Amino acid sequence: MKKSIIATLVGIAALGGATVGGGIYADNKLKQEYYLQNNPDADKRMKITLDKFDMGLTSGKVSWRGDITPDLCHQDTKFSIRGEDIITRGLNGYTIQSKVYLIGEDNKEIFQLDGNTALSWGGELDSKLTVPSGSRTIDTDEIKWEAATLAVKGHKSDHQYHLDNFNFEWPGMTASHPDKPDSPGYQFSLKNVKYQADMEKGDTTAWRNGTSLFTLDSAAFKMGNQTFDFAVDKIKAESKQSAKDNKYAMEGQSEVENFRINNIKFDRIHYNLNLRDINGEGIDRINKFFDRQGKECVDMNSPDTQKELMEAVKTFLKTGIKFDSKGNQIYLNNSAVKADADASIPPIEYKNDEQLQQDLLSKLKYNVNAEVDKNFIREVLKLASQYDPNIKESDLDNVVKEMATALNAEVTEDKLIIKRSQ
């Protein structure tokens, strides 16, 4: 009987010791990989100082301060945040509830964010950050904003966390300034800002396949004296990046339902841009350069840096590149400008700067086709005349002739047609 009791106590002690030891190991990894303590792989533009790290068997509290330096060559330009975290250790990993404060120049907390993060034992990150709604008055400017949320997901690699999914939503804000005798007031508003990005998991220093989407319902700015009134509705911008056979492609499409300047409204705006056959070695060089910027001061004007960037350019030129932009258009009172373009640079072997410039000019192939309605030019002149009395709508014929001469364009009864190729 005594033997069985002793064996049980020994087992409990061993299990407890393993649990405590495992917890200490996990907590040390949390310090290194989440709070970036003694982490040689961490980006040095973000420095976290732990004021308190108090973890028990299943829970704990952490107080920290973060100093963010966007450019390591300018250490005096930085901003700071402070955080209070409540951590729970469970069967699936850590959950962290956070209060994060933005610190102003006078070392006062000027902004609060609420965070909730889950870190799995398998290295997955799932986090949500909320900016509570609020208002602020600065002198006579009044700013009000609705609650904004940022949700991110990521994975652990190279002893740090990297984002794979990014989702930002902000219902909007308003800002206003009252009219004064010495200065006009203004009104500004944003409504429904959203941004989402998704990337495949993989080597964090490599280009990863992914998509992004940005939308904005509306934005408006109006001067109190009525001299300027701007509004835009329904902006949508999409992009996609992909890789195949060590060549990369970027595709982008954007559209705007309409935007208005005073009483002139542009609408049905479409713009598309695609880059293809981008050399993978060049992308790797650029990624490594950006990674180095996060580890040390990189002087962009130094000869060594310029040489490094030129080496990256050479790798792009070795295999050539293709570009196209088609289906572009903008309307103004039912008159339009439409344009298509494509271009390609064949493989070029770099010898020297002078030879490179000659080869680019001689080997570049492109096609440009554009049509400009004369009524579109007339409407633009009408808009410009509101700000410059020397510009008149009656100048249309002279402006069309000048544009046709400059662009070597064909003039028809109602259009300016531009066709260029090489």
Image: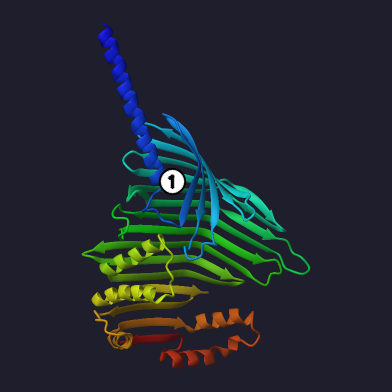
Where does residue 100 sit, x and y in percent of width and height? 54, 45
Vertical placement of 297 versus 165: above or below? Answer: below
Where does residue 21 sit, x and y in percent of width and height? 34, 31
**Residue at x 54%, y 83% (from the top left corner):** 378
Q: Is residue 378 left or right of residue 9?
A: right
Where does residue 241 sit, x and y in percent of width and height? 32, 62
Q: Residues within 10 Å of mark 1 (few under 14, many from 20)?
A: many
Q: Please state, as top left, top right, bottom left or bottom right, where the C terminus lies in the image.
A: bottom left
Visible in this render: residue 325? no
Q: Please state, as top left, top right, bottom left or bottom right, where the N terminus lies in the image.
A: top left
Q: Which residue is mark 1?
A: 35
Choose top left, top right, bottom left or bottom right for residue 289.
bottom left
Vertical placement of 358 versus 134: above or below? Answer: below
Front residue of 326 and 52: 52
Vertical placement of 413 versus 323: above or below? Answer: below
Visible in this render: residue 277? yes
**Residue at x 49%, y 89% (from the top left corner):** 400
Front residue of 351 and 186: 351
View extreme (right): residue: 181
**Residue at x 45%, y 56% (from the top left corner):** 195
Please, what is the three-letter code of the amino acid marked with disc 1? Answer: Tyr
Front residue of 252 and 362: 362
For the residue labelled by badge 1, is the local secondary structure a helix, a strand or a loop? loop
Number of marks: 1
Choose top left, top right, bottom left or bottom right for residue 78.
bottom right
